[in-house]
Image (spheres, coloured by chain):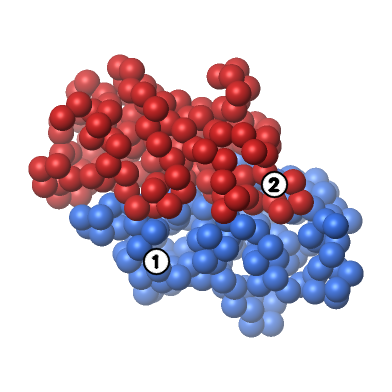
């Protein structure tokens, strides 16, 4: 199964947020989070909650690891840490896009950088750095979704 | 009307549950707050929508991160009078244990409060408080009244 199709089997929380995989190019993964009322963090402005960006960057960072050419299928993965810098508030009623890239895949750790943007890729809302432990959980059965 | 001002006018500026209820994303996650005197504990009741790994099963790292952020912001709002909800500048999350499909609890400490920026640390746990599943520290931008 192609990586992109495999990633489209989203974990329940990603489904609840409404995120989707847009594209997979090399070690990079592009995802989209359509604007939705239940994601709003500030009722005064209608801006989405920082937690939405945290949740979706975490998820998309995991996808970037699975996109990496050296990733062995069905290797278990656990987030070790995630840091997010919020550059500026998101615009209300606009979709959010995520670009994550696995910049190094070591034997037991993977490192991922990511950005979240709206409109165009230079309009950065947040940046992220994450590290994942590989082989942390038992190997997933064939065709597992998350 | 601005939500914080509205709650202040109604004399409910310290009603943390009302603040949570006004934030759609906090409602979506189902976050509640328990207050005993000046001590706050946030609660993330388990729902299947919070799952990130269906096989273990384990809570989604993003849901954990969001809960840590909400826990930090609620403590900050409890400690200070703000004109607006604080804005997160950055948050750094350590994942310590896999989150089981049960209720999760959180506490936060404002480690330093400046005039415009506050540093907040938060920790969340499930069955045992001494075994946190994740911790975070972050900076938040304030708009004092």
Q: Which mark is residue A116?
A: none
- Judge from the rendering whether residue B62 lies leftward or rightward of residue B59; answer left or right: right
* Image quadrant occupied by the N terminus of chain B: bottom right
Query: Residue at left 80%, top 46%?
Result: B116
Q: Work out how far the residue at label 1 is from the one at label 2, CA to CA, in angstroms.
A: 25 Å
Residue A46: image tag? 2
Give left or right: position of B94 versus A50.
left
Q: Decide: few, some or many residues near mark 1? Use Cα within 10 Å; few <14, some 14-19, many ≥20.
A: some
Residue closer to the observer: B117 or A65: A65
**Residue B92 on image: x %, y %:** 52, 44
Q: In this view, does B108 lie above or below A101?
A: below
Q: Which chain carries label 1?
A: B
Q: Chain B is drawn in which colour?
A: blue
Please tell me whether residue B59 is drawn above or below residue A112 in the rendered image.
below
Residue B21 figure quarter: bottom right
The local secondary structure at tag 1 comes to loop
- Secondary structure of the residue carrying tag 2 is loop
* Residue drawn at the location 34% of the way across and 53% of the way down: A12
What residue sits right under mark 1 in the picture?
B47
The picture's colour for chain A is: red
Picture coordinates of residue A113, whole percent (x, y): 44, 27
Tell me if residue A86 can be seen.
Answer: yes
Report if residue B139 is visible in the image: no
Left of A17 or right of it: where is A86? right
State the count of labels: 2
Label 2 resides on the chain identified as A
Q: Which residue is drawn at 60% across and 23% down?
A: A119
Q: Compare residues B138 and B100 and report the one nearer the observer.
A: B100
């Amino acid at each position: 199964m192609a990586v992109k199709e495999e990633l489209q089997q989203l974990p329940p929380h990603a489904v609840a947020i409404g995120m989707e995989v847009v594209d997979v190019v090399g070690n990079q993964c592009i995802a989209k989070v359509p604007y939705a009322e239940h994601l709003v963090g500030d009722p005064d402005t209608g801006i989405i909650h920082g937690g939405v960006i945290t949740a979706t960057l975490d998820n998309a960072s995991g996808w970037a690891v699975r996109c990496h050419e050296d990733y062995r299928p069905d290797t278990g993965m656990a987030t070790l840490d995630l840091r997010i810098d919020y550059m500026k508030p998101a615009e209300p009623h606009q979709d959010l896009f995520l670009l994550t890239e696995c910049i190094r895949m070591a034997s037991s750790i993977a490192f991922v950088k990511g950005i979240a943007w709206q409109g165009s890729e230079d309009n950065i809302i947040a940046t992220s750095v994450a590290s994942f432990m590989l082989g942390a959980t038992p190997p997933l059965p064939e065709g597992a979704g998350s | 009307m601005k939500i914080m001002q509205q709650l202040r006018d109604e004399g409910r500026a310290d009603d943390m549950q009302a603040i949570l209820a006004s934030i759609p994303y906090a409602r979506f996650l189902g976050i509640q707050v328990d207050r005993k005197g000046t001590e706050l504990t946030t609660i993330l009741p388990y729902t299947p929508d919070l799952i990130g790994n269906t096989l273990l099963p384990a809570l989604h790292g993003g849901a954990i991160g969001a809960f840590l952020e909400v826990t930090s912001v609620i403590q900050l709002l409890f400690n200070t009078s703000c004109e607006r909800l604080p804005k997160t500048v950055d948050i750094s999350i350590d994942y310590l244990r896999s989150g089981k499909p049960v209720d999760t609890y959180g506490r936060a400490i404002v480690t330093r409060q400046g005039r415009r920026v506050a540093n907040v640390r938060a920790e969340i746990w499930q069955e045992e408080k001494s075994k946190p599943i994740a911790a975070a520290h972050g900076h938040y931008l304030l708009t004092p009244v």
